[in-house]
Amino acid sequence: MKIMLVDDKDISNFIMRKFIEIRKPDATVKEFTDPAEAFNGINDFNPDIIFLDLNMPIMNGWQFLDKMLTDKLSQKVAILTSSTSNEDMEKSKSYGNVVNFYVKPLTPDELARVFADLNTQS
């Protein structure tokens, strides 16, 4: 499984990587703190899932998702954010490739559910 982490905070990516190592030790993980750089790497890496933060400078998560739509990229995305806004949660449902919306910090059990959901959707 190939997993892309897109969060402007190194510590968030570090924590997610550690949780992934516990739940999916064979996964290949690429971390990005620059969403534009991450976007440019999607085609080369072709992740099975992208864990995407919403609140980032320069290109936020919504802009990232919009660009995915424009470029017809369909990789699955799990939004992982500190936002507890119902508006953000509802907006995320308008993107066909968003599999779920999680409020940080994601627990190892929630991560296991993400992977289980991915397996049933494949």
Image: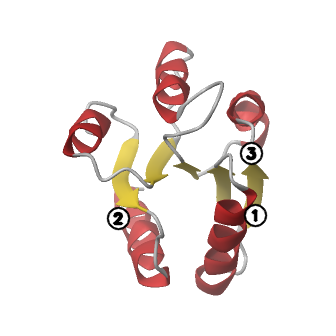
Q: Which residue is mark 2?
A: 120
Image quadrant holding the N terminus, namely bottom right
Mark toward the viewer: 2 or 1? 1
Looking at the image, which is closer to me, 30 or 122? 30
State the image quarter where residue 22 is shown.
bottom right
Among the two numbered marks 1 and 3 on one chain, the one whose residue lies closer to the N terminus:
1
Compared with residue 14, is residue 51 higher up or lower down, i.e. above or below?
Answer: above
Local crowd size for mark 2, using a 10 Å CA cut-off: few (<14), some (14–19), many (≥20):
few
* Callout 1 touching callout 3 (CB < 8 Å): no
Q: Residue at x 63, y 31 (%)?
A: 57
Under mark 2, the amino acid is: Thr
Compared with residue 66, is residue 47 higher up or lower down, i.e. above or below?
Answer: below
Q: Which residue is mark 3?
A: 33
Among the two numbered marks 2 and 1 on one chain, the one whose residue lies closer to the N terminus:
1
Mark toward the viewer: 1 or 3? 3
Cα separation between marks 2 and 3: 30 Å
Among the two numbered marks 2 and 3 on one chain, the one whose residue lies closer to the N terminus:
3
